[in-house]
Amino acid sequence: MTLLNDIIHRPFPLPSKRWIMRQSWRNVLFLHWPIPPEKLRPHIPSILQIDTFNGSAWLGIILFVIEGIFPFGLSSVSLTPKFPEINVRTYVTYNGKPGIYFMSIDVENWASLKIAKRWYRLPYKSAQISLRKEKQTYSFQSIRKGNENPSISFKGEFGPVSEVYYAKEGTLDHWLTERYCLYSSNNVGNIYCGEIHHRPWPLQKAEIEMVRNTLFIPFNLDFPKVKPIAHFSTGVDSLMWNIKKLRI
């Protein structure tokens, strides 16, 4: 079955069959912490509702490798070599449609910084990022470029610790990972929506050893004292549509 025809799991229909790019996401680490919605509210456009699960909002850090970005019609030619990305995100809804809201995205890839940042109105930051695998353990380190004091960095190691499973609808695992659109904003308050499609995530429970995490400092959010919910995925291929300005 082709990716475009595998849609039974989606919470809403595909926008069309005219996607603009395919991305390959691999070796994905999901980390999530519960957070009171009111702590996130200053960082989210007021038109977007903060999505909650059992009354709690969730703050996520997702680390993964983009192994290729393939424009429509050039299925075997990636625009870039593979590169790692780290995003800080939370979850929102607009008119009942759930999605992702990115608070920061760290990359060192020039195409993301120069092109996707403007195209998708996403908060890309320049960083030096390394991700290495030894047997079943992944080691990572990221340092954001700039003059922040303290520096914005993320360092540790992780690995899968369970068999592969697919999250059931209605569970927290499903709510955190199965998201099929993103929302973004610009400096003058416009809100945009970008549609995403992929097959359900093949998940594994993961263990994380955190050495350093200052990714939340720019938002004046204290690093949560509770241990995060951690998932690993070998990855999925995704389709993305052109971003559209919402008519508000």
Image (tube, helix red, strand yellow):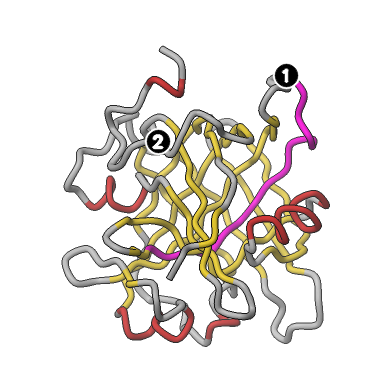
Query: Which residue ends up furthest to the top in the rendered image?
Result: 1
**SS class of the residue under badge 2?**
loop
Question: Badge 1: few (under 14), some or many (20 or more) residues near its Cα, within 10 Å?
Answer: few
* Numbered mark located on residue 76 in the image: 1
Is 3 situated left or right of 176 in this image?
Answer: right
Asked if residue 88 lies in the magenta stretch, the reply is yes
> In the figure, residue 213 lies in which quadrant?
bottom right
Q: What is the magenta range?
A: 77-91
Question: Badge 2: few (under 14), some or many (20 or more) residues near its Cα, within 10 Å?
Answer: some
Query: Which residue ends up furthest to the front in the rendered image?
Result: 247
Q: Residue at x 42, y 65 (%)?
A: 90
Say if residue 209 shows up in the picture: no
Q: Nearer the viewer, mark 1 or mark 2?
A: 2
In the picture, the quarter occupied by the C terminus is bottom left
Q: Residue at x 80, y 49 (%)?
A: 111
Q: Nearer the viewer, residue 243 or 215?
A: 243
Say if residue 73 shows up in the picture: yes
Residue type, label 2: Leu
Report which residue position mark 2 lands on. Answer: 14
Q: Position of residue 104 (x, y in %)?
A: 60, 67
* Numbered mark located on residue 29 in the image: none
42 w.r.t. 83: above or below = below
Q: Position of residue 236 (x, y in %)?
A: 49, 31
Asked if residue 96 lies in the magenta stretch, the reply is no
Q: Position of residue 124 (x, y in %)?
A: 69, 63
152 w.r.t. 178: above or below = below
Q: Nearer the viewer, residue 183 or 218?
A: 183
